[in-house]
Image (tube, helix red, strand yellow):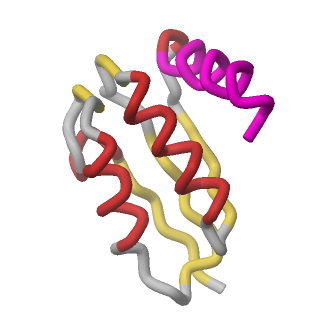
Amino acid sequence: MSEIEIILPEQIDSDLGSRNKIEDLYQNIPEDVSKVVMNFKGVEFMGRSFAQEYLNQKNKATFEVLEINMPDDVQMMFNIILKLNGHL
């Protein structure tokens, strides 16, 4: 059982716009990981397509995903996507 922390601005960018980047990030998480902490500290923007793909990947993940340091506007974007999609 292992846990890793991913600081999104360091791994991707502070401007989270491309859905391909989060797809690549999830695909490169080692198989033996049981928990991933997604650290949003320093994220300045997140686009709708990124948010949608993030939630799709999180839903398919075989490990627990926990978000920390999420800015209010990022949380609002996730809430919009979840509402539109019936909580995935």
Residue at 59%, 54% (x, y): give it: 58
Measured as percent of width and height from the top left, residue 73 is found at 49, 10
Say whether residue 20 is left or right of residue 52.
left
Measured as percent of width and height from the top left, residue 3 is found at 56, 72
Main structural element of the magenta stretch: helix, strand or loop?
helix
**Quadrant housing residue 8:** top left
Residue at 78%, 34% (x, y): give it: 87
Looking at the image, which residue sits at the far right? 86
- Position of residue 10 relative to residue 68, above or below, is below
Residue at 43%, 82% (x, y): give it: 30
The range drawn in magenta is 74-88
Measured as percent of width and height from the top left, residue 35 is found at 62, 68
User: Considering the image in quadrants, where does the C terminus appear?
Assistant: top right
- Position of residue 6 relative to residue 35, above or below, is above
Asked if the stretch drawn in magenta spans residue 49, the answer is no
Q: Nearer the viewer, residue 32 or 80?
A: 80
Residue at 26%, 50% (x, y): give it: 21
Say whether residue 49 is left or right of residue 57.
left
User: Considering the image in quadrants, where does the N terminus appear?
Assistant: bottom right
- Position of residue 22 relative to residue 67, above or below, is below
Looking at the image, which residue sits at the far front? 85
